[in-house]
Amino acid sequence: MLPHPAPSPGALTGHDERTAARLLSGNEAIAHAAHQAGVRVAAGYPGTPSTEILEALVRLDPERAVYVEWSTNEKVALDIALGAAMGGARALAVMKHVGLNVAADTFLTAAYTGARAGLVVVSADDPGMHSSQNEQDNRLYARFAAVPLLEPADSQEAHDFTRAAFELGERFDVPVLLRTTTRVSHARGRVRSGPPAAVAAPGFTRDPAKFVMLPGHARGRRRVVLERLEALAAEAERSPLNRVEWRDERLGVVTSGIAYSYVREVLPDASVLKLGWSHPLPVELVREFAGRVGHLLVVEELEPVLEEALRAAGVPVEGKRYFPREGELTPDLVRRGFRAAGWLPEEPRRPLAAPTTAPRPPVLCPGCPHVAPFLALREMGAVVAGDIGCYTLAATSPLAAMDTTVAMGSSIGMAIGLARSGGTPGPVVAAIGDSTFLHAGLPALADAVCNRTRVTVLVLDNGTTAMTGGQPHPASGATIRGEAAPRIDLAALCRALGVDAVAVVDPYDVAATSRALQQAAAHPGVSVVITTRPCVEVPTKVRDHPFTVVEAPCIACQACMNLGCPSITWSASWFDGRRRVQIDAATCTGCTVCAQVCPTEAMVPLPDWSPRR
Amino acid sequence: MRERGSILLVGVGGQGVVLASAVVADVALRAGFDVKQSEVHGMSQRGGVVSSHLRFGPEVFSPLIETGGADAVVAMEWNEGLRSLPALAPGAPLVVNLHRVVPPGACRDRHTGHWGYPAVVLEAVVAQVGDVRACDALGLARAVGSAKAQNSVLLGVLSTLTPFPEAAWRASLAAHAPRGTAEANARAFEAGRALEFPRETFAQAARMGALPDGEAVHARAWPPAVAIDEGWCKGEACSICVRVCPERCLAIGPADRAVIAQPGACTGCRLCELLCPDFAVTVTEAEASRAR
């Protein structure tokens, strides 16, 4: 292990931007490396923990040498990147793990076509599901597609491996999967970057046998894929991306990605084979390592990918017996695993006990325009097929108004299925955000129209991709660089798809929202209700006249508490055995929704308030 | 914490945990250390818990701190400080804001009014942890001009525990403060740095005065009973009581009349009684249960 060189004090002051060590997140490091590698086209769809890559790339490129975009969905992003690479431009496609499912159709065949210039596909996985609906291990996609897989363990490697991925991809004419995890993408570490790469000029050359995947062509390319895989395996055996760190030879640990950091932390004396290029697996390298150590363990996050491959190659190894297959690895869990395997003594010291604390689950923001529509759906007794976004939080108490959530855009198709099941106790409503609607909702809406299924689609239009921090989408009217862009009219789009009952309402008008949803549910066909209000956080922080509670009229009925607004909590005052409420003026955005549901008009605008500048 | 250290910063979305952590990371880097820092984005920003792990030393591998491995915990919020106690290494200091941010979920037991938020029993925490550096960071920040600078107050407290030169702290703080707030943050940092512990911990708590009665239960001792006069009820066509009930106890029954679907959920707020246009609803405090 080469220790990172110590930076001189003040290295961060940035006098030499090109070579100084900077503290970068893994995502920022990937952006830096791609920029230095001469990437010309970069596309992605926002998704935690991948989002910051393209945002950082835009910041690094004020001269606009790189074409960067937020795409409509991940498949579009990968198609764009593949097309660009076929055109001879280095290209980057970034997405979260589940995004690669959307792009998988292209991804698996892109391995057949190859690309002329380097094509790097970044999959940011989310073990532990900090902000995801599953924790699939996308290393398996590399095996599925027969493409090389690089797994950085920290920011410096995220940088170095991105550079290496472009070179590797061009050398072997293959897309490269760069797989990070939340702790690599979002952890910051020191990064030193190298000089910019000299990149060949773009140029598209027609080559139908390679680029047009007719069955006859594809059969030929299938052979190329398999031969290339063997060549890649031979290269992986001698690649510097894989390295052996010899220490105590009684125990050897094969590891990759963030797990390497935990192994080094917890068991600094063990010999380690660190796999940075883990597919195709350098089996001989592992076999040689295994032959020299007394005992061999595999420490990997999520699926036993390395472990099973090594067992299949006849290398006796243990892994998941001691280290969990479920959830995110932590140094604690790695320590526990080594203890269970007998390589660490039992811990004598005991951490302090946690006292009883209040749970603090994520909630919709004060003034969130998504609250009132779900209040209405709950009152209607609707069966709500939900989708992916901030509004998925409407599934939690007290709104508790969402019955299913599976994948991006699934709400509409699932609503069709629920309606066709004939078993729903109330009207069937699909609730989907504007960005998600454009991502994968449109095909299902077309389906509902053409098959005459009676469903209501609630499009929660807040003008942005809010969950991931506010990225523009095709109905936002802006590009990733903040330039004005054509803005798709969602209502016109729904009408064009053949929906005749389209209503647009302001979700801050509780009664109008409720009425619109009831009328839509009564419509004997496909109906769409679009609730339109900008997100209170992005692009502009909405801070309107805050409200306050007048104590005397408040009968502590708790109707406002059913909104789940973080600005409303109990006060020290009681009425008839119940606590009255108070509003935190510092966080209240003045949306007025609580004042509308209050039966005694106890909520009034805060006196003596003036907007800040 | 002379040659290496692990600092856990915790708080609530919007309190500036991530920014404070970036300041500390930068300070450590300026002081010549290797640094790793890790926080989780995404859902945690929606008013949830935000935590940032910061580690420095000659060479740092894990971006995460082990349980019982933090050389200091800096909590921007009381409840989050308590939640993070298991992170502390034996004898390590807890720097904690006495200010509370009550989550809406803590106000949910409408029958008893029980507050699901831990009361500030400072003595117990001091007895358990030992080195507790608590202060009213919000009050101190307000006093120097900006409520938003409460994270800088806590960084001021933390600065006295770290091996980083004071100049590095000031430079980093100035570099990271949002535009126009550098001075307020510098004053807040100073205010935190000037606090003398352990003396200040109890002095600050006393100065904050009486806090709301977290644990008290004032609720009625008997459950309410709701009665519907079916002769007057208009059922589905009206549905006002069903819609206004905050506890969602009422529903329209098969006979197209309001029925009490979930009697146990009623808190006796009388909204249905007050708003029924036909005087068909009566809420009483059940005599039988009152006798108990």
Image (cartoon, coloured by chain):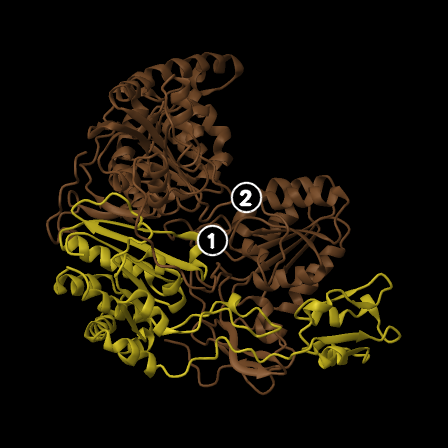
Chain colours: A brown, B yellow
Q: From this viewpoint, is residue B73 visible?
A: yes
Find residue B227 and report its horizontal and vertical position in percent.
Answer: 80, 75
Secondary structure at badge 2 equals loop
Q: Quadrant of residue A256?
A: top left
Q: Quadrant of residue B275?
A: bottom right
Frontmost residue, A573 versus A362: A573
At 61% from the left and 85% from the top, the residue drawn is A553
Find residue A106 and report its horizontal and vertical position in percent.
Answer: 48, 29
Residue B35 located left or right of residue B113: left
Find residue A333 and report its horizontal and vertical position in percent.
Answer: 37, 43
The quarter of the picture where the C terminus of chain A appears is bottom left
Residue A221 located left or right of residue B276: left
Q: Amino acid at mark 2?
A: Met
Residue A9 located left or right of residue A464: left
Disc marking residue B71: none
Q: Residue furthest bottom?
A: A552
Between the C-alphas of marks 2 and 1, the distance is 13 Å
Disc marking residue A408: 2
Q: From this viewpoint, is residue B14 visible?
A: no
Which numbered disc, 2 or 1, marks the residue that appears first in the sequence? 2
As drawn, A212 above or below B291: above
> Which residue does the numbered mark 1 point to in the structure image?
A467
Frontmost residue, B85 versus B180: B85
Q: Amino acid at mark 1?
A: Met
The 10 Å Cα crowd at callout 1, few under 14, some 14 to 19, many 20 or more, is many
Frontmost residue, B224 versus A508: B224
**What chain letter is assigned to the residue under label 1?**
A
At 26% from the left and 24% from the top, the residue drawn is A293
As drawn, A370 above or below B100: above
